[in-house]
Structures are given as structure tokens and as C-alpha cells.
């Protein structure tokens, strides 16, 4: 059985409902969700004049390979209404984004997938929910646990843990 950490994000529509639907599809088609972080609210990262984002990290057990996982996640994003505008530079508003943060302790770099996620250590909105459920997980490239990565993260953006839970 493989263990994966995923980050759900979005800033359009009702993210609470979208995350709940995404988790339902994940459990139906990919594997069992073992842990959920709280949902966190933050200002849009790398974008100006955009609605706040909501993020949640989940821990998943799956029989799928990393490549099969990303294909299934892209399908779930599309089912939930995610439209990818490939020609647009930079970050975009979105209904749903599901990133693979870690897959076991593997290091993978292909055209379609890079694990660990290459920018997770730069993003407080990913690190804080990840730390809530995996504070001792060791980043396989950086050789630091998530608590240590939060402590040295240069991101000064406001990240607020919400009381609502799925």
C-alpha cells in the first residue's frame, strides 16, 4: 500500500463543498483517506486582486502508483469543473487544485509529475495544514521534518486555520 499526502486548494465557488466532493471521489476511485487537516484560508499566493484561497491536506492510502495517482487526480479536477488555461502565464483562480506533496518517501521527476512537490517548502499555506497531520514527516530531499520546514519558511503570508471542518 502506498501513502500519499495531497493538498486541495481553491478560491472559486464554495471550497468546503468542492473539497468534500473531491474527497468523496478520491475515496471512491483512488484509496482511503486516513487523515484530514483543518481547512486554512490565505491570501492568493503569486496573484493580486484575487479572492482568498482555501487549502486542506489529506493523507491517503492507495494501491495506485504515483503516475496512476496523478492521472486519477487530474480526472477528478476535471470532473469538478477545473479548466486549465495552458496559454496563461502564472497562477490562476480555480475551483479545485489537487497537488501531490509526497508519495511514500519517493523522489520522482517526470514531465507530468515532480515529487516531492517542488515548491511546498516555500508555501506556508501548504506547510501549516501539512504540519497539522504530518509534523514529523521527513522531506526526502531537504532531510528536514515538516515542523522544521514551517520554522524556516520565508513566506510571510497570513494563513488562518478555520474552525469549520469537513
Image: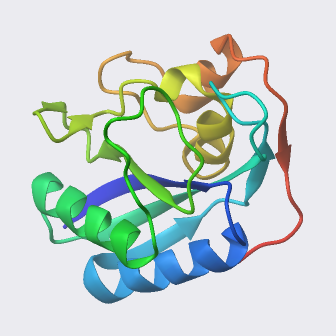
Q: Nearer the viewer, residue 62 or 50?
A: 50
Residue 32 falls in image quadrant: bottom left
Quarter holding residue 63: bottom left
Depth check: give the residue in front, 56 or 2.
56
- Measured from the top left, where is residue 118 in percent x and y? 36, 25
Query: What residue is shown at x 14% (from left), y 67% (from top)?
Result: 64
Whole-percent x, y for residue 16 in the image: 71, 73
Residue 27 is left or right of residue 107, and the answer is right
Q: Residue at x 45, y 76 (%)?
A: 80
Residue pictured at 19% horizontal, 37% vertical? 106
Residue 107 image offset from top left, x and y in percent: 19, 31
Q: Is residue 45 above or below residue 151?
A: below
Q: Residue at x 46, y 38 (%)?
A: 137
Residue 117 spot, x, y in % from top left? 36, 33
**Can you say whether 159 is above or below 70 in the image?**
above
Q: Quadrant of the N terminus?
A: bottom left
Colour scheme in use: rainbow
Amino acid at each position: 500500500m502506498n501513502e500519499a499526502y495531497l493538498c486541495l486548494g481553491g478560491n472559486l465557488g464554495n471550497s468546503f463543498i468542492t473539497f468534500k466532493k473531491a474527497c468523496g471521489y478520491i475515496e471512491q476511485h483512488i484509496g482511503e483517506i486516513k487523515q484530514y487537516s483543518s481547512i486554512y484560508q490565505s491570501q492568493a499566493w503569486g496573484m493580486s486582486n484575487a479572492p482568498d484561497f482555501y487549502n486542506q491536506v489529506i493523507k491517503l492510502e492507495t494501491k495506485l502508483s504515483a503516475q496512476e495517482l496523478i492521472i486519477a487526480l487530474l480526472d477528478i479536477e476535471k470532473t469538478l469543473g477545473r479548466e486549465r488555461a495552458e496559454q496563461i502565464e502564472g497562477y490562476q483562480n480555480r475551483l479545485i487544485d489537487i497537488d501531490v506533496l509526497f508519495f511514500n518517501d519517493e523522489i520522482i521527476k517526470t514531465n507530468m509529475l515532480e515529487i516531492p512537490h517542488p515548491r511546498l517548502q516555500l508555501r506556508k499555506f501548504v506547510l501549516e495544514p501539512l504540519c497539522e497531520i504530518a509534523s514529523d514527516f521527513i522531506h526526502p530531499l531537504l532531510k528536514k521534518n515538516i515542523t522544521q520546514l514551517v520554522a524556516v519558511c520565508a513566506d510571510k503570508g497570513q494563513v488562518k486555520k478555520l474552525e469549520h471542518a469537513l
